[in-house]
Amino acid sequence: MIQTVSPKELADLVAAHQVDLVDVRNPDEWDTGYIDGSRLVPLPQLQADPDLVLSKARPIVFICAKGVRSLAAAKLADRFGYTNLYSLEGGTKEWSREGLPLVTPVVTDRRAAA
């Protein structure tokens, strides 16, 4: 069963339980800021082989920018037999609007290194 969680509910869930935070955005979006403790698994990578990147050991919360891709990711995981699935309602945009912090990675200019 897939449940949606609000940013506040997710903040409480993260504080109270061990959950796997899976951000399904693309790397450029990730570079603009992500929820602390999350890991990047772009949706195409998840779609290619969910069992390679997911674990059934903990509840999984899928995150994207607005909540659309995270819900698609949760539905995919559900079809593969995963349980305790959550989708962040409103994604990182709503998370930020609620005043919750995003981690902004230090990104070097990838073109300069080429």
Image (cartoon, helix red, strand yellow):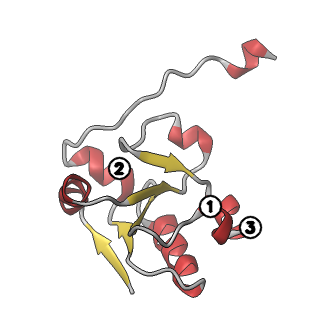
The alpha-carbon separation of the residues under discs 1 and 3 comes to 10 Å
Pick the residue in front: 78 or 92. 78
Report the residue at 67% width, 64% height from top.
52
**N-term-proximal mark, 1 vs 2:** 1
Identity of the residue drawn at 59% across and 54% down = 41
Q: Residue furthest front?
A: 57
- Residues marked 2 and 3 touching at CB (< 8 Å): no
The residue under label 1 is 53
Q: Are marks 1 and 3 in contact (CB under 8 Å)?
A: no
- Which of the 4 quarters of the picture holds residue 5? bottom left
Q: Label 3, on which residue? A: 48
Earlier sequence position, callout 2 versus callout 3: 3
Asked whether, in this view, residue 93 is left or right of residue 22, the answer is left
> Which residue carries the number 2 mark?
93
Residue 63 against residue 73 in the figure, above or below:
above
30, above or below 91, in the image: above
